[in-house]
Image (spheres, rainbow, N blue to C red):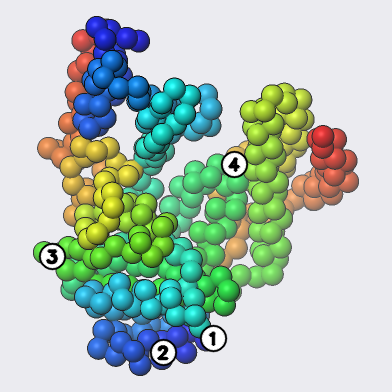
Amino acid sequence: MIKNGKLLRIFYSKPRSVHNNMEREITATKELIVNMGPQHPATHGVLRLVLDVDGERIIKCTPYVGYLHRGIEKLSEDLTYVQALPLTDRLDYLASAANNIGFCVAIEKLLGLEVPPRAKFIRTIMGEMARICSHLVWIATHALDIGAMTVFLYAMRDREVFLDLFEMVTGARMTVSYPRVGGVDVMLTTNFLINCINLLKHFQKKLLSMRP
Amino acid sequence: MQSSDIVNLLKEKFSKEILCTVYFRGDCTIIIKRDKAKEILKFLKETPSLDFDYLIDVTGVDYMGARQPRFNVVYHLMSIKNANRIRVKVEVPEEDCWVETVSDLWATANWHERECFDMFGIEFKGHPDLRRILMPEDWEGYPLRKDYPVGSDLGDKEWKTFKDILQQTKERA
């Protein structure tokens, strides 16, 4: 990407300070500025890193982290608490139930509400299922990054069962919006409980199969 | 150590600086004046019996039209050793909008203060690198202020670079 002894401009809005640096002549110095991202296969998200490199060595790294900022706080300004609940799903869509519960607990604390024990149990079950789902995705992508494709497939296959369980109760697979302020949306079905117990019987064995 | 003990300790040392303390559902909040805010936070961190070594969050609040002064900067502190939590609020008026940085006390404050500056336009004096962090560098206005519009009716506040990029894309096509 070298043109007339200068680095070609990278098409991006205008962080002017960086642009000025980019136009430095390569012959003038050994250091090079490399723009990594916003889209890059190694970042698992949108993140831009401006790297000062000297050969293979990174001398300085300036991260630009705002690409995933969606202004949820600003959006929530005009919404009621219940309307803002679906936004909390999207904070971490791999463990959305856990985010919902955190949001509801905060409102209950403000209102001074006591949640019935049954709702607490249901929330715990859903929260733990969300946690397992999230951790399965973690191990899947982490293994994929170091070249272990099989673990990725195993973890995604096992996660599917949990997503089916979420769908059985809430109607949604990932963004569940299941808890409500003061309790939960609907009661768990018998079908869910049977499937959940069945899953617990087999899941540990599957988990062990992912060990190296 | 109970949170009331912490408050008493602070009141002994900084009686003039503490405006009030609020207890709400087990949370303790101390509202302090701005001038010696950094000293108080330093005291909270460096006194061995308090040992607030973990700064959970720095954020701002805009009380436009509801309270004077308009802004608060909120520090959430935790002591990992003593398992204590405390919330410190510093009052910041609109026309003279600054507080001193605490990024030399807790390194994590660096990015939190940048975010607070980005969203509320509160200046952190002595901050090593006070730039916008979430919004683009050439964004105008401070989005989390209450007088900043929520919807699409930004008018002349719309991000100019976005229009430029649209224009460039059209020209390329």
Residue to which mark 1 is pinned: B1
Amino acid identity at mark 1: Met
The answer to whether marks 1 and 4 sit on the same chain is: no
Determine the CA span between mark 2 and mark 1. Answer: 11 Å
Position of A162 relative to B118 (above/below): above
Image coords of residue B65 (percent x, y): 18, 67
Residue to which mark 3 is pinned: B96
- Closer to the chain start, of discs 2 and 1, is 1
The answer to whether one can see residue A22 in this image is yes
Residue to which mark 4 is pinned: A94
Chain to which mark 3 belongs: B
Which image quarter: residue A163? Answer: top right
Amino acid identity at mark 2: Leu
Chain to which mark 4 belongs: A
The answer to whether marks 2 and 1 sit on the same chain is: yes
Q: Which residue corresponds to the image point at 36% horizontal and 54% vertical from the top-left?
A: B110
Position of A26 relative to B3 (above/below): above
Looking at the rendered structure, the secondary structure element under dot 1 is loop
Which image quarter: residue A52? Answer: top left
Of discs 2 and 3, which sits in the foreground? 2
Of discs 2 and 4, which sits in the foreground? 2
Q: Between residues A73 and A66, which one lies in front from this camera angle?
A: A66
